[in-house]
Structures are given as structure tokens and as C-alpha cells.
Image (cartoon, rainbow, N blue to C red):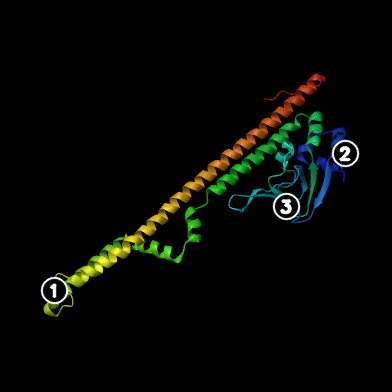
Amino acid sequence: MSCKPELLKNVPLFSLLDDDETAVLASHVEAKAFAARQRIYKAGDPGMAYVIVSGSVRVTTVDEDAQEVTVDEPTKGDFFGFASMLEQTPHQTNAMALEDSECLEVSRDDIEALLLKKPMAGMDLLTTLGHQFHAAHQLVRLRATRNPNEIIEKEMTTGERIADAVASFGGSWTFIITFAVVLIVYTLANEILDKKAWDPYPFILLNLFLSMLAAIQAPVIMMSQNRQDTKDRLRGELDFDVNRRAESEIQGMARKLNQLDERIEDLSDLLRGKGIPVAEKG
């Protein structure tokens, strides 16, 4: 259904429009109501922008680990889905109403009509893009805080936990001191017992036990070292993923800002050709 002009006056982006401009835009913009937890659009749907008149929305995406990640949670007066609408490409995110919400569905043609009437409204659109840009950076920061140790802990088997425990104890002063005390007590006991000793000098039984201990302990410690190598490799992979996502987000936002700037310049040239004064960008 068509939008009531009164609704546009409550939206910061359209609040500077006069009555005639508001009426023109209201005839193009469509108002839609969404119930709590109702999906507004999904990834792959045709790109349309939405302005929230009331309520709140959650915009999400799915990362390479098949986990749902919250990109933004716009509220009253905020835009979402703007980039896909501007590029005329399918949505790359999912949007769902968190509560009963009313939104204005805006197309690219509606924005063109707005900028023809009110060129400086483009600054409000740039502010919206800036907000999305900061939200993307915040998402990257949150993803960067993932702890590789916690990820590995969830996938550890019982044998791997035992190997880590053995390696941790075998490389401690507690093990060294305890082992030294046991050796000293063992050798002194056999020396004192003399002919009644169960393992007289040169302590052949003790050498057998030590050889068996070394044969078992060495591969266990190597298992733990392999675990550490896995942690280092995972940490490097996470760093690479964060850097790649950051680069992709920055390039995407820069491209969208350039497209919007070029669009505003085209409209400014059109208005100058018609003799309408246009404020220069600072």
C-alpha cells in the first residue's frame, strides 16, 4: 500500500522535504508491516532498501563456517538493504523483524526522485553507508577475537587430552624433582639392603624401567607438539580470514561510496543544467 506523507516526516532521512516533495515521494514509497520474527527478505531476493518507521530489525549473514553472524540491528529511522538496492543486485544478507515493525520499502527509482528534488539528501545516504561501514568493521573485530585454543578444545579427543597432560607434567619442575627423589630413594634402598636388594648395582631393573618410560614418553610429547603446531596453523588461518574479510569489506564499501558519489555528481550536473543552484561539497 502507498505510504502516508505523515510517516515520511518521522524519518530523519526525509524530514527536510517540503510538503510537495513529501507527497511525491509518498506516492512512490510503499509501507509494509511485519510481525515479530517475520522475515523481511532473504539472501538472493531482489535488492530493495527499507527504512524503519517503528520497531527493530536484525540483519544477518552466514560465514564460511556456516555460522549465522549479526551484521547490524537497525532501529527507528535507520536504513538496511541499501547497498543491494543501489547496485541493483540480489541481497547478500537476511533481514528479520525482532518485534512488530513498520518499514518503508524504497527502490532505486524512489531515491533518484528524492535526489532530483533534494540533492543534499545524498549526505544522509552517505551517513547511512558510513554506519554500515563501521558495523562491518565491528563485525571483523568480533570475528578476530575468536580464540583458536577454544576451537581446538572443542575438538580434542581423550587421547589428545592425555598427551597434553603428560607433556605438561613431564616438562615441569614438579616432575623433575619427583623423579630425582624416586631415583635417589630407589638406589639408596638397594644399596642399604645389599645382598637382599631386589635390584642390586648396576640397577638393571631400574634401567629397564627408565628405557620403557623414555620409549613411551617421547611419542606422547611429540603428540603434544603436533597439537601446538595445529594451534599455530589455526591461528594463522584465522588471521588470514580476518584480513581477507576486512579487505573485502573495505573494497566493497569504497566501491559503493564511489558509485553514490558519481550518482550525486550526475544529478548535480543535471540540476545545474536546469539552472537550479546546487551547494558545493565541502
Q: Nearer the viewer, mark 2 or mark 1?
A: 1
Q: Nearer the viewer, mark 3 or mark 1?
A: 1
The residue nearer to you, when weighing 157 against 279, is: 157
Q: Is residue 186 above or below residue 45?
A: below
Question: Which three-letter amino acid code belongs to the residue tagged 1?
Answer: Glu
Question: Which three-letter amino acid code belongs to the residue tagged 3?
Answer: Met
Query: Residue 217, percent across and down?
Result: 32, 63
Between the C-alphas of marks 3 and 1, the distance is 80 Å
Q: Is residue 122 above or below residue 276?
A: below
Quarter containing the C terminus: top right
Q: Secondary structure at mark 1?
A: helix
Residue 280 appears anywhere in the view: yes
Query: Residue 99, percent across and down?
Result: 75, 55
Q: Residues within 10 Å of mark 1 (few under 14, many from 20)?
A: some
Q: Residue 27, labelled with which disc? A: 2
Task: Identify the residue under disc 3.
Answer: 96
Q: Earlier in the sequence, mark 2 or mark 1?
A: 2
Q: Residues within 10 Å of mark 2 (few under 14, many from 20)?
A: some
Q: Residue at x 29, y 61 (%)?
A: 173
Q: Residues within 10 Å of mark 3 (few under 14, many from 20)?
A: many
Question: Which three-letter amino acid code belongs to the residue tagged 2?
Answer: Ser
Query: Residue 254, percent across and down?
Result: 63, 33
Q: Residue at x 74, y 39 (%)?
A: 85
The residue positioned farthest toward the left in the image shown? 195
Specify the quadrant of the image occupied by residue 78: top right
Task: Identify the residue under disc 1.
Answer: 191
